[in-house]
């Protein structure tokens, strides 16, 4: 009995007993807890979004059973995603890297959104980028077709028909049958090339209006041509093409601001490229600094 009393006075015994009691209490009272980092919250807005996606696909709201399945699929995706990140499966994956880059670029676009530009800003942009907005020259013309099947007689036949046309012969009744249009109205060189080929389009754009001329060759045959009207190219006013100018201006501004944001981010990184067992520093343009290049040149 004296030994027990003496043992009871030992601080170590008190410490062990207290530890045992705490352990038992913790084991009896603890619930199956989850690390907050592994807690998945499916919010009400997320459920609504899942239901909305279902409606857009199937053109009807989901049933309770279908909605429960959507939620469980979302939870499964989230668990797999987090576990894949924990295992480092996102590293060294070019597709993951590309998607992450695209998402960041979209985010930068949102962050660099600009207010609607004024007419003064757009007009200045139009004058600085006239080549992007020029209306090309346009022609209206008629053509009489001669097939390559005429062989060696093609040239002489064309000369004879040209005389008749200049004498006001009925052009619609002359030449060989063809699916090509007899007349074209207010067409650009690009539009002409789609029908007759680039060779013919370039040649016809050089003709002056007023008289039958030719023959002009295409990949299909020879053509006698009357240009009835020529409208020279011009730069339209801002009022005529304001939506197009605004679209181009905003797109260019987004590119500039995204590049500026990237340069700012790039300043926080040092980039090295390993080559032939050497680490070589490169700048943001992808080239080595001059001093590094000189050192390697001297090696």
Image (spheres, grey):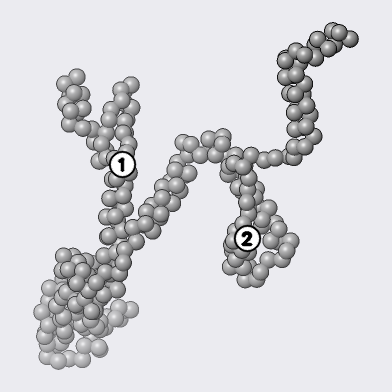
Identify the image quadrant of the C terminus.
top left
Identify the image quadrant of the N terminus.
top right
Nearer-N-terminus badge (2/1): 2
Crowding at dot 2, Cα within 10 Å, few <14 / some 14-19 / many 20+, comes out as few
Is label 2 in a helix, a strand or a loop?
helix
Q: Can residue 246 be seen in this snapshot?
A: yes
Residue 23 screen position, x and y as percent: 75, 27
Residue that carries the numbered disc 1 in the rendered image: 266
Which of the numbered marks, if any, corresponds to residue 44? 2
Closer to the camera in the image, 8 or 247:
8
Residue 69 lies in quadrant: bottom right
Closer to the camera in the image, 188 or 285:
285
Q: Can residue 149 be seen in this snapshot?
A: no
Q: Where 212 falls versus 101 (above or below)?
A: below
Q: Where 89 falls versus 230 (above or below)?
A: above
Residues at marks 2 and 1, CA–CA distance in whole angstroms: 39 Å
- In the picture, measured across the screen, residue 17 lies left or right of residue 133, that is right
- In the picture, measured across the screen, residue 147 lies left or right of residue 65, that is left
- In the picture, measured across the screen, residue 255 lies left or right of residue 201, that is right
Q: How many labels does the image show?
A: 2
Q: Where 220 falls versus 268 (above or below)?
A: below
Closer to the camera in the image, 61 or 219:
61
Residue 217 lies in quadrant: bottom left
- In the picture, measured across the screen, residue 90 lies left or right of residue 135, that is right
Q: Which residue lies furthest to the right in this view?
A: 1
Q: Do the residues labelled 2 and 1 touch (CB within 8 Å)?
A: no
Is label 1 in a helix, a strand or a loop?
helix
Which of the numbered marks, if any, corresponds to residue 14? none
Residue 76 screen position, x and y as percent: 65, 48
Nearer to us of marks 2 and 1 is 2
Residue at (28, 27) in percent of width and height: 280
């Amino acid at each position: 009995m004296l030994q027990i009393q003496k043992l009871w006075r030992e601080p170590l015994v008190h410490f062990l007993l207290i530890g045992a009691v705490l352990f038992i209490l913790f084991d009896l009272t603890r619930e199956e807890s989850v690390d907050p980092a592994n807690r998945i919250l499916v919010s009400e807005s997320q459920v609504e979004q899942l239901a909305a996606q279902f409606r857009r696909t199937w053109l009807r709201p989901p049933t309770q059973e279908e909605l429960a399945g959507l939620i469980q699929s979302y939870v499964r995706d989230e668990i797999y995603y987090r576990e894949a990140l924990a295992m480092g499966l996102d590293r060294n994956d070019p597709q993951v890297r590309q998607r992450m880059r695209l998402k960041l670029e979209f985010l930068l676009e949102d962050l660099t959104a600009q207010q609607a530009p004024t007419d003064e800003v757009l007009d200045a942009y139009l004058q600085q980028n006239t080549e992007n907005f020029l209306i090309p020259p346009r022609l209206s013309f008629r053509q009489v077709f001669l097939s390559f099947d005429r062989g060696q007689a093609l040239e002489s036949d064309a000369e004879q028909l040209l005389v008749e046309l200049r004498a006001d012969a009925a052009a619609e009744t002359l030449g060989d049958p063809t699916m090509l249009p007899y007349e074209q109205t207010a067409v650009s060189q690009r539009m002409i090339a789609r029908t007759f080929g680039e060779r013919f389009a370039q040649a016809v754009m050089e003709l002056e209006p007023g008289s039958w001329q030719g023959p002009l060759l295409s990949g299909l045959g020879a053509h006698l041509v009357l240009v009835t009207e020529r409208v020279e190219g011009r730069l339209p006013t801002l009022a005529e093409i304001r939506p197009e100018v605004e679209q181009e201006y905003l797109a260019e501004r987004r590119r500039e601001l995204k590049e500026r944001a990237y340069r700012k981010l790039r300043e926080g990184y040092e980039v090295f490229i390993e080559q032939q067992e050497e680490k070589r520093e490169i700048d943001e343009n992808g080239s080595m600094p001059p001093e590094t290049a000189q050192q390697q040149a001297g090696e």
